[in-house]
Amino acid sequence: MRKPIIAGNWKMYKLLADAVDTALALKPLVANATHCEVVIAPVFTALKTVADRLEGSNIGVASQDCATQNSFGALTGEVAPAMLKDVGCKYAIIGHSERRQLFGETDGSVNLKTKAALEAGLKAIVCVGESLAERESGNAENIVGGQLSAGLSGLTLDEMNRIIIAYEPVWAIGTGKTATPAQAQEMHSHIRSLVGKDHGNDVAASVRILYGGSVKPENIGELMSQPDVDGALVGGASLDADSFAKIVNYK
Ligand code: PEP
């Protein structure tokens, strides 16, 4: 039985006071959500304060990215996964399509970041997804498969147990276009079978695969009814506590 995860990616939104206000507003709204893990990913500068204010609650905190290594060094602007763990993070989002498209993230750096996050004791939410052109040319499964096998290459069984995969078709992120539940299911099932080939059937059966791309209170129920959809990574609709709580409380 895979426990669903509903994660909110706040991207580069919210000053500290707003981040704390949203987190505190969310806390009572999701306090009874025992059916899923609830995660929010504020900007780096808000992580510690938000994590401190949520201590003892059922909301975990994620970073939106991390460095490729835990050993400290002359890496201006980078934040080591160990530093994120140190301020209260439990998860790190890695390889989000905005990082891939705008900041030169590659499958290779995703793999290094994933290993570093796991080494620090974080759970890694590894994002994969195809562009519109890749889908229209019939290449979606190959592209996602390539991202997946490279991003998760060399992980041990124990490490794979702390991996969460987020399938986020790029054409559905922030566009208002959601993959249909059938499209999401088809790709999630493909991802699960690829994980089975690379890492074994036990891992494939237990790994959580989240869907991301214009998830809203109105469409979460249908997405979650798909057998291989184990939760959601939510952008825009996670910025407001009421709307995110409605997604968390989809049941
Ligand atoms: C995201 O940022 O991961 C995302 C899926 O965004 P949105 O829900 O706004 O499409």
Image: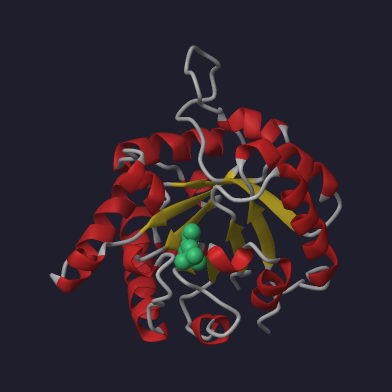
Q: Is residue 112 above or below residue 159?
A: above
User: In the shown orientation, is residue 181 left or right of residue 21?
Assistant: left
Q: Residue furthest top?
A: 74
Residue under the image location 17 percent in, 73 percent down: 136
Q: Is residue 83 above or below residue 165?
A: above
Q: Quadrant of residue 177?
A: bottom left
Residue 119 percent coordinates (x, y): 55, 33
Residue 223 percent coordinates (x, y): 50, 82
Q: Is residue 112 above or below residue 194?
A: above
Residue 159 seen in the figure: yes
Q: Quadrant of residue 182?
A: bottom left
Q: Is residue 216 above or below residue 61?
A: below
Q: Pick the quarter of the image with the N terminus.
A: bottom right
Instruction: Give whichever of 14, 223 is nearer the camera.
Output: 14
Q: Pick the quarter of the image with the C terminus.
A: bottom right
Q: Residue furthest left?
A: 137
Residue 108 percent coordinates (x, y): 31, 37
Q: Quadrant of residue 79?
A: top right
| Colour scheme employed for the rendering of this structure | secondary structure
User: In the shown orientation, is residue 152 left or right of residue 63?
Assistant: left
Residue 153 seen in the figure: no
Residue under the image location 50 percent in, 24 percent down: 77
Q: Please tell me how many numbered marks the rendered image carries.
A: 0
Residue 124 percent coordinates (x, y): 53, 47
User: In the shown orientation, is residue 223 left or right of residue 120?
Assistant: left
Residue under the image location 77 percent in, 46 percent down: 17
Instruction: Give whichever of 158, 58 is nearer the camera.
Output: 58
